[in-house]
Each structure stands twice: as structure tokens, then as C-alpha cells.
Amino acid sequence: MDAIDARQGRVKRLPREVRERQILDAAVRVFSAHGYHTASMDEISDVAGVSKPMIYAYLGSKEDLFAACIRREATLMMEAIAGGVQGDSAPDMQLWQGLRAFFSFVGAQRDSWRVLHRQATSQGGPFSDELVAMRGRAIELVDALLVRSATKQGMDEQATKGTSAMAAALVGAGESMADWWVDHPEVPGRTLATWLMNLVWMGFGDLVEGKVWTPNED
Amino acid sequence: MDAIDARQGRVKRLPREVRERQILDAAVRVFSAHGYHTASMDEISDVAGVSKPMIYAYLGSKEDLFAACIRREATLMMEAIAGGVQGDSAPDMQLWQGLRAFFSFVGAQRDSWRVLHRQATSQGGPFSDELVAMRGRAIELVDALLVRSATKQGMDEQATKGTSAMAAALVGAGESMADWWVDHPEVPGRTLATWLMNLVWMGFGDLVEGKVWTPNED
Amino acid sequence: MDAIDARQGRVKRLPREVRERQILDAAVRVFSAHGYHTASMDEISDVAGVSKPMIYAYLGSKEDLFAACIRREATLMMEAIAGGVQGDSAPDMQLWQGLRAFFSFVGAQRDSWRVLHRQATSQGGPFSDELVAMRGRAIELVDALLVRSATKQGMDEQATKGTSAMAAALVGAGESMADWWVDHPEVPGRTLATWLMNLVWMGFGDLVEGKVWTPNED
Amino acid sequence: MDAIDARQGRVKRLPREVRERQILDAAVRVFSAHGYHTASMDEISDVAGVSKPMIYAYLGSKEDLFAACIRREATLMMEAIAGGVQGDSAPDMQLWQGLRAFFSFVGAQRDSWRVLHRQATSQGGPFSDELVAMRGRAIELVDALLVRSATKQGMDEQATKGTSAMAAALVGAGESMADWWVDHPEVPGRTLATWLMNLVWMGFGDLVEGKVWTPNED
DNA sequence: GATGAATGAGGATTCATTCAT
DNA sequence: CATGAATGAATCCTCATTCAT
């Protein structure tokens, strides 16, 4: 009455892997729609078509579940970006390729990823750990690009100091621009990438070449 | 502890204005520390040294209270920035002055403001209304600067299109840099302002002058 | 600055009697509109244009206040009815006069009295005391009429027993009819009185005369 | 008290249906005892031997719960009355049977039903919806009886007009008499039914036969 | 493996009531 | 006399989480 019950309807005895994906998909949807706190495990289990105990068994607590969502989505994004960048390109081309990939990804996930991103960065607790780490790695990558570019062109020690801050700025600029995109969906991602590229890369290039802006007095 | 308590008057009757300030101060502290959802009205009332009914009587619901916090803090910030910018300066100087003021303000409020900012932007609901509006105004101001600068130098129609996106990027870059600052508090705010100035302003200047970056192929 | 302040606006130093009437008027309005529990002392004080401490000083607790409302309104009603009945009339005419007065009163107070009545009879607690007493007196009066009428006509001992129950029924019928009136306001009160008179008085008359209805079997 | 507690299974898992009945039973008890507003969900859950979340999960909000109580009890009553009336009896016998059933039901539920009835009719809000509907149907049924009886005996057009008002009066008289019963429990329900029958039916019969009461002058 | 049943704990909100001025 | 200021005490409701089946 349990093992021999072959009617393939009643209780779908799916492999764990499939169940986990179902749950994560539902969780991403619900978290995106309502935010971390407002989302309820009940709704997630409903959307997933899985009972709550299963969620706890497979993914752990709500916090764990959220972290798993972030991890999965962020990983997808990093992979998308990494896949778009050719390792043997020049630094500027690499940055360009990365930006293109970034905006492509965000454009395709408009409703899910950016909301998750917001949620994760805003929660004070341990939630953002995954994302902070991911963001840190992104910043480091950009920083490496900047440094490589600068070094190659002979940037002086002094000026190098701020590259990491600038990398952070660049990443933030990208995020902010993605945000701006929500209200201007007609602009193609490629254009955004171009704008940002010009804005920051040209400025950085000037900097490397010694063209420094300084306030007159102050 | 009840009858012998000789401290003059168990309950100080303070005017509404004072109490409201107390409450807002406490609310900013608590919201910053725990985030909107996790913060409890109980804790806020404790920190404020006021009973909960007073909060509801004076500031309304939790949501109202949060909005009031955001409004107050954001207004303070905008005023600080506006106060730092001289209307008759050149665009680049105005931007510089604004950045200086921004980083000064953030530096002074390190623990409170930026967290509130995060909270507000992450909550999907009506919370962020105040802040979104404020941010919109900030972006508009920067945009005006960019446009003014570009026009003066004869930027072509085509290129002008993206100024608002770039303004958004710049604001985001600033926010992100402020975030980076948390982990590098030894860097003076002035330096941050300089970096950001160089990063974006120089790039923007190049753009205006027709030095456009374009991908080789793609 | 207190006694000599002759500007007749600021603090109206009205005699207690007037204040009490103001408060009771407001209370009746608010209780009628929202019901006892849902009504708030805040709203009553607002409507009365008097501060809450005054209410407590003059009328006591919320419960006391409600009782005072009931008492006042019920007394008005009893007086209206008593005023409409001529002591030297025949029983049937007295009942008729009473019904006329009752429906007149209810018709004039449509929005206030009946709601209060409902509230009072429904609250389990000590609220209804006033009203129950008043209602009891009304029933007694009707009962006296019935008894007088019956005795005069030589009703046998046995049949007399139920007069008090019938009086209660009559009062209830009147209340219920008044209720029905809300949905049929076009019917004049006089007509209602006639209907009720015919319904119960004629039946009672038959009873007195020995025309008793009994179930065939059962 | 924790580990050694050997009673088999601390929490009995009962099917939803059973729990719902338990909850409704408790709710009827508590609402009857304290009235809608004064009753607390805490007490209901205590009495039901169920935790509050179950109540909300199964029956919804306090308002919903109250409505469910009214609905259940009123339905029971209507069924009791309907079950007591024989469709092929004469109108007077049907009324008689209905009254008998009504007083039987009320007599058996003395502590619960009538109080609920009072509560429901007194609350202004959407509570009474169920009950108002039920009462309306009762009045319609009685009205139908009256009309049928009158038509059969050739009542004139004019007099027929007030049947619905009289039906309302009759229902109110019944309720009021049931109320009076609380203070005179020694009287058997059958007697009450007889009294009421005589009071209203005989009067109605006279009316039909043209014996109309009219005030002498006025 | 899978789930309906069950709850402890806590959170927002309201309100009658009373001081201190 | 008159009131704004202040609060203790409840109340409704929700939700993450876990058993027993």
C-alpha cells in the first residue's frame, strides 16, 4: 500500500535534487516578491507544491533557505560574467565584456535577482554573508583589472592606493545603473554598458596618465 | 522604590516637541541596529524612555515612524550637501563640494544613516517613498550639473542622452564608496571625494570632449 | 491671568450642568454610532468638545457614562409614554395611547434610541441594569392594564396567570415592530400602533371572553 | 514533567473536523458568557483546549469565528423548527408546531443561544448578517402562514397589508417571551406556546373576520 | 518519504484611566 | 476649573518550527 502503489499521481516520490530545485525556485520567487521578512514559509511551500517539513529537511531554516537562494543566484551571475570575459583580452575589453554580461544577466532576471540583491544587502544579519562575499570577489576582480591596467602603463605607487575604492565605486555604479534601468527599460543593456564604460574607464585612464583633477583651492 | 522615590516627579511632563525628538532619535538608533522588520516597537520605546502609546500617539504606526526617520535623516543630509555647495561655482567645483559634504555627512553618521538608507531602499513597500524621492532629487541635481557642464562645452545631442543614467551611476558610485568606507575607515573622506571625482568627472570630461571609448569589435 | 481673563473664548467656564449635558449628548451620539465597546472615550471627548478628565470628573467611568446615557434616554421615553396616556381612559384606550406615544418617540429618535436600546440589552454585564429595570416597569404597566381589563370582565383565575408573560410578549412585539419599521419608514407610526393593537388586544379580548385556542390533539 | 511524562503522546492529533467542532463549542460558550467584545480569543482557546493558532488556521479571525457560531446555532434552530412543523397541517397548527419547536429549542439551549442572539442583533457590523438573514426567513415563513390563513378566509385587501409587520411582531413577541422565560423557568414551554398562540392568533383571527379595533376618537 | 496537525513566542496596536501642570 | 501628557494592561493576530502519523 506504500511501495507497490504505482499510481503515478498521489505522492510524487521525486529525487532529492529535483525537490531542492523546486523549493529554491519557489523561494526565489516568493522572496523576490515580498522581501525576506514578509515572505512566509507557508507561501513558499505552497508555491513549491511541497510541504513545509520537506523544506526544513532539505534546506534548513528560513535563513538557510534564503542564503541558498542568494548563493545560487549569485553564483549563476558570477558564472555568467566569467563566461563572458575572455581571459586573454586587454583590461578594458575585459571590463567591457564583464559589464555586458552583467547587464545581460540583470536584464534577463529583472524581477528576481535585483530584488534578492536588495534584500540581501539590506538585512543586517548573517544573511548578506553570501552576497557580501560575492560582491567582494567582484570588486576584487575589477580591482585586479584596474591594477593590471595601471601597472602596465606605469601608474605611480601613490595613485594605486585607491584602486580598490574605485573598484567598489564602479561596482556600485553598475548596480545603481541597473536600478535606474528599471524605470527606463527601453534602453538596451549594451548602451548602459557603454555609458558606464565611458564614465569610469575613461576617467580611470586619465588618472593613470597623470591627468589628475584637483580642486583649485579649498 | 515606589513611595520613597524622592526624585522630583516620577514622570516628567515634557512638551510634545521634545518627546517627538527623543522618539525619533531612538527609532533611528534601533532601526539602524536591527533593520526595519527586526526592530520592535518595544525596544524603541525602551530606548526612547517613553511608553509605546506615546509613540503611536505622536508618530503613528511603525511604518509611519520609519518614514519619519527616513524623512528627517534624508532631509538633514540634503541640507548638509546643499549647504556645502556654492551656487556660483563651476560645475566641477560644485560636484566636488557636494561630494565633500556627502562624505562628511556620512562619516559623521556612520552607524546610523547608511543603514537606514539600506533599509529604506530594500523594503519594497511604501517605505522608501520618501527616500526614493530624495534620491531622485539628488540624481536630478547631479544630472543638471552634467548637462550644464556638457552644454557649455558643446556636447553633441547624441551623447547628452545618457546623462541621467550617468548621474544615477554617480550617485550609486558614491553610495557604494561610502559602503566601502566602512571597512577602510582610516581613509579620510576628502580622499574618497577626490578619487570619485577623478573617476567620474574626468571620464565625463573626456566624453564631452569627444574622446569616446568603443569596443574594438564585438 | 485666570480669573480676570474676560475674553469669552479661551476656556469656557461653563456650569457643571451644561457640561454634563454636552457630554451626555456627545456620548449618546457616539455610542449610538459605534456601539458601546467600539466607542472610544477619545472620540466622545472630541465630539463633546471637552477634555477626557472632565468626563471622568463629571460622569465617572465609561460604564457609568453609558448607564447615564441609557438612564436619560429611557427616562425621556417613559415620560413621553406616560405623558401620552390619560389615567382615566379605559384599558384599551390607555394601551392605544401608550403605543402611539411609543412609536412617536421611537420615530423621532430613530438613529439614537433604538441603537442604544440594542446595545444595552445585549451587553451581558451591569450595563443593562438601568434598561432592564425600565423595561420591567414597562412590562408591569402593561400587565396592570391587562389585569385590570381582565378582572373587570371576570377573567378566571387560571387564565390570569399568563398576563405578565403576555405583557412581555407585547413589549417585545412592539420593539420588534419598531425594528421592522427601520426597513419600512414609509409606514406611519399610527398605522403600526393600530396593527399591533389589533394583533394583541383583540386576541387578549377573546381570551378574556373564554374563546381559547387549543391544539386539536398533540 | 518533561521526560518522564508517560501519558501516551502529549498532543493528540485529531482530524480537522473534530477540532473545528471543539473550537465552535468553546466559542459559543465563551461568546455567550461574555459577549462578543469582552470575550477573548485566549479564553476561547483555553476552553477549547487548543492553541490560538489553530483557531485562526481553521476558523479565521474573531469576527469569522463569531459568524460561524451564529451560523451554526441559527441553522440548528431553523432545522429544529422546520422539523417540528408538518407541511400539510392547517396554518394555525403549523404556527403552533413552530412555536412549540421554538420554545423547546430555546429551552434546551437556555444559556447559549439567546445570548448569542442578543449579541448578534446588537453588533452593528457585519456580524449580524447571518442572523438577520435567518430572522428574515423566519418572518417570511410566519408571514406566509398569515397570508395563507387570511386569504383562505377572505381577508380584504386593505387588511392584508400589515401581515409582514405582524409577522415581525410575532417573531419579536416570541423572542421577548423567551427572554421573559429566563426569569420564570418553572413555566413549561408548552404553556408559553399556548399563551403566545392565543395572544396573537386569536387577535389575528378576529382581524380576519372583520372585527377591527379602532380608537373611539383621537 | 511525506504531511497535516499543532504550538510557543512575540509583535503591533488600542484604550480606559490618571497625573502633573 | 481644565487639560495635555503619560501609561499599564490587554487583545488580536502571525509565523517559524516541529511532532505524530
Image (tube, coloured by chain):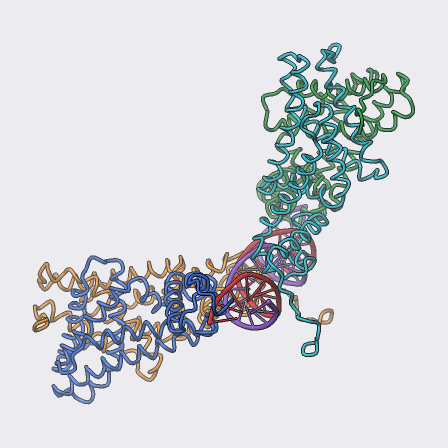
Chain colours: A blue, B orange, C green, D cyan, E red, F purple
Vertical side of B38 occupied by C150: above or below: above
Q: Position of residue A209 (x, y in %)?
A: 11, 82
> Can residue C1 be seen in this snapshot?
no
Left or right side of A58 for A196:
left
Residue at image position (49%, 64%) is B21
* Residue B42 in which image quadrant: bottom right
Residue at image position (75%, 23%) is D200
> Can residue D70 be seen in this snapshot?
yes
Q: Residue furthest front?
A: A4
Q: Position of residue B158 (x, y in %)?
A: 10, 60
* Residue B5 in which image quadrant: bottom right
Left or right side of D189 for B66:
left
Q: Quadrant location of the C terminus of chain A? A: bottom left
Vertical side of D67 occupied by B110: above or below: below
Residue at image position (18%, 68%) is A193
* Residue C30 in which image quadrant: top right
Q: Residue furthest bottom?
A: A157
Name the residue nearer the viewer: D175 or C56. D175
Q: Position of residue D113 (x, y in %)?
A: 71, 43
Q: Position of residue C128 (x, y in %)?
A: 74, 41
Name the residue nearer the viewer: C26 or A180. A180
Left or right side of A99 for D98:
right
Q: How many marks?
A: 0
Vertical side of D111 occupied by B78: above or below: below
Left or right side of A27 for A97:
left
